[in-house]
Image: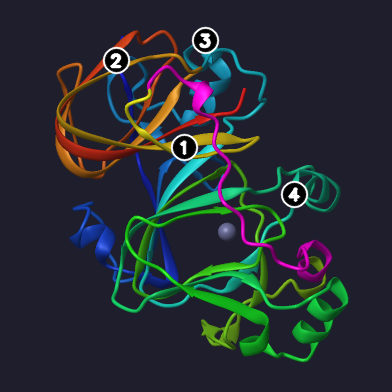
Amino acid sequence: MDIIRLEPVFKQMIWGGTRLKTDFNYAIDGDAVGECWGISAHQNGDCVVKDGLYAGMHLSSLYTEHKELFGNIKSEVFPLLTKIIDANNDLSIQVHPDDDYAKEHENGSLGKTECWYVLDAKEDATIVIGHNASSSKEVKEMIEQGRWSDFIREIPVKAGDFFQINPGTVHAIKGGTLILETQQNSDVTYRVYDYDRLSNGKPRQLHVKQSIDVIKAPFVPETPNKNPDITANKNMDQLVSCPYYTVWKNSVSGEKRHVMDQPFMLVSIINGKGAINNSPISKGDHFIIPNGYGNILYSGDMEMIISTPAY
Ligand code: ZN
């Protein structure tokens, strides 16, 4: 049985940069490529299988037609989405709804819980996580009065940091930051504030009412929850375990063995190169280890982010 290699989907964004091309060596054009959807079955960017038995198939179809590869988990759609984000400029300040709000207000869509592993950040870089309003009433006032510098909670960020972003959390990546995001398979984002920027001559749409509806107050910084019992593979760092996913960072130097004890695993190589059971893998590769893959032998010198859905 082979791993399922995927062809990423790239997104031009007004805040995007060139590091997906220069750091990750993806063969892409444009000076404002903001996102690489490395493992995605979302309709706005459905990855195609690169090679092997299922070459050319979209991940969404592979998931519905071959549920055995994914451990026959209950989720109707492929549950997760992995992206690399290159923020050359500041992203808009945003917030996501939870499943209940999205179901009611966004055509039955899933809500969005996401998490960020910071791959790189320029010196003195910051990130927006949370806000400084003491109540929902104050959230509404501060937003309506445009008191952005009072409202937004900005903190320093460096490579290796990790953030869990639950629904209702105000957040934004700022310029000079490269991150790997693991998220629920959803594209529902409410934009609270876009620094009054113009895109094609006009401001991008804001979702003020929805944002005020879903922003939780007061903001309480959280330590990501962990669940060490979820796997027998103890030789990697668990970053978070939440009701939607568990995410690990796995560093390999020489050889490392894992057993496949999850429905399936999503893997993104973020540094170096090597092999998985003698199949070559290197920085920028995104693949799925299917159900029933058996014993895993990583070899080489590399770092990767691994995730699995909650099941
Ligand atoms: Zn987000």
Separation of marks 1 and 3 at Cα, in angstroms: 22 Å
Mark 1 vs mark 2: give the one in front. Answer: 1
Separation of marks 3 and 2 at Cα, in angstroms: 14 Å
Q: Which residue position is annotated with label 2? A: 2
Q: Amino acid at mark 3?
A: Glu
Residue 189 x/y as whole percent: 65, 60
Separation of marks 4 and 1 at Cα, in angstroms: 20 Å
* Crowding at mark 1 (Cα within 10 Å: few <14, some 14-19, many 20+): many
Mark 4 vs mark 3: give the one in front. Answer: 4
Return the residue nearer the eye: 28 or 300.
300
Q: Which residue position is annotated with label 4? A: 98
Identify the magenta region: 211-233
User: Which mark sits nearer the N-terminus, 1 or 3?
Assistant: 3
Residue 6 x/y as whole percent: 35, 33
Q: How is the image coloured?
A: rainbow
Return the residue nearer the eye: 89 or 150.
150
* Crowding at mark 4 (Cα within 10 Å: few <14, some 14-19, many 20+): some
Q: Amino acid at mark 4?
A: Asp
Q: Please, what secondary structure does the residue beneath circle 3 have?
A: helix
Q: Please, what secondary structure does the residue beneath circle 4 have?
A: loop
Q: Is residue 103 above or below residue 308?
A: below
User: Which mark sits nearer the N-terminus, 1 or 2?
Assistant: 2
Q: Amino acid at mark 1?
A: Val
Q: Please, what secondary structure does the residue beneath circle 1 have?
A: strand
216 in the magenta segment: yes
Q: Quadrant of residue 249?
A: top left
Tag shown at residue 247: 1
